[in-house]
Each structure stands twice: as structure tokens, then as C-alpha cells.
Image: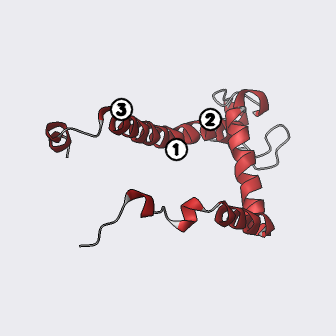
Amino acid sequence: MADISLTQLQPLDAVRSAGYWQNVGARLVRDKTAMAAAAVLLLLVLAAIFAPLVAPLDPLDGRLTNRLKPIGTEGHLLGTDELGRDMLSRLIWGGRLSLLMGVTPVGAGVHHRIGRWYHRRLCGGLDQHHHHAHH
């Protein structure tokens, strides 16, 4: 068996190389479709975050006299639902919940990974009993 020192073990080139990520970034920026999609996603995320400021009406306020108005109705760009609630406002506010549901598990996963990393660094790794108990 060959004797390999830790200094000889190198991370993957893609992770180590800033040039790789610069190349990926440059190719992304040149891709018009990717940039258009990124702009739309950014607008949706910003609209969700700033829903109280950008939503035209209260998403819960319905008037039966306004029920099922078509798209383009004055004061209701995307029309109204069966209870007379503004659809654009409901979509903007609903985006907040969708964003939260997407960000929460990612945040929990990152928190878990960071906690495990700290534990390995501070405690010299997981002891055998703890390691087997949770797998």
C-alpha cells in the first residue's frame, strides 16, 4: 500500500479553481435565456419579500359583487376569484409562503451541516456511540 501524506491529497479541481467558477459565471452571464430567467426569478422573489408594499389590494378582502372578474378588469389586473378577491394580490402574498417553504428546509440543512462540521472540528469527530446511535 502506498504511503500518501495529507499534503498530497488535493481537493477537486472544480472546487479549488476560482477560474472554473469564473468560467461558469461568464458563460451564465452570456446566456440570454438564463439571464432572462434569473431576472424573472429575482422579480418574483422581490415581490414576495415586499408583498405588503407592492400588492395592490388586501389578498383576503373579497366582495361578492367583484366575483370572477376577468383578467384585465380595471383595478384587478389578473381578475378576481370566486369570492371576489384580487388574484394578483393573492399570488404575490402566496409567493411569500412558497419562498418560506423553499428556504426553510435549505436553511435547516445548512444549519445541520455547519453544526456537524463544528462538532468534528471542536470535538475531534463524533464518538463511536453517538455516531452509531443516529444512523
Residue identifier under label 1: 102
Mark with earlier residue (2, 3): 2
Q: Report the mark closest to the observer, 1 or 3.
A: 3
Query: Does residue 91 appear to the left or right of 112 in the view shown?
Result: right
Residue 127 appears at what percent x and percent y? Answer: 20, 38
Q: Identify which residue, 126 or 24, lies in the foreground.
A: 126
Q: Identify which residue, 16 or 76, lies in the foreground.
A: 16
Q: Identify which residue, 59 or 7, lies in the foreground.
A: 7
Circle 1 crowding by C-alpha within 10 Å: few under 14, some 14–19, many from 20? few
Amino acid found under the numbered disc labelled 2: Leu
Q: Residue at x 75, y 33 (%)?
A: 55
Label 1, label 3: how far apart the Cα atoms are: 31 Å
Residue 77 appears at what percent x and percent y? Answer: 80, 44
Residue identifier under label 3: 122
Residue 80 visible, this angle: no
Circle 3 crowding by C-alpha within 10 Å: few under 14, some 14–19, many from 20? few
Outermost residue to the bottom? 1
Q: Residue 14 carries which label?
A: none
Asked if marks 2 and 3 touch (Cβ < 8 Å), the reply is: no
Q: Which residue is drawn at 70% across and 46% down?
A: 44
Label 1, label 2: how far apart the Cα atoms are: 28 Å
Residue identifier under label 2: 83
Q: Secondary structure under badge 1?
A: helix
117 lies above or below 122:
below
Query: Does residue 87 appear to the left or right of 133 in the view shown?
Result: right
Amino acid found under the numbered disc labelled 3: Leu
Query: Does residue 117 appear to the left or right of 125 in the view shown?
Result: right
Q: Quadrant of the N terminus?
A: bottom left
Q: Secondary structure under badge 3?
A: helix
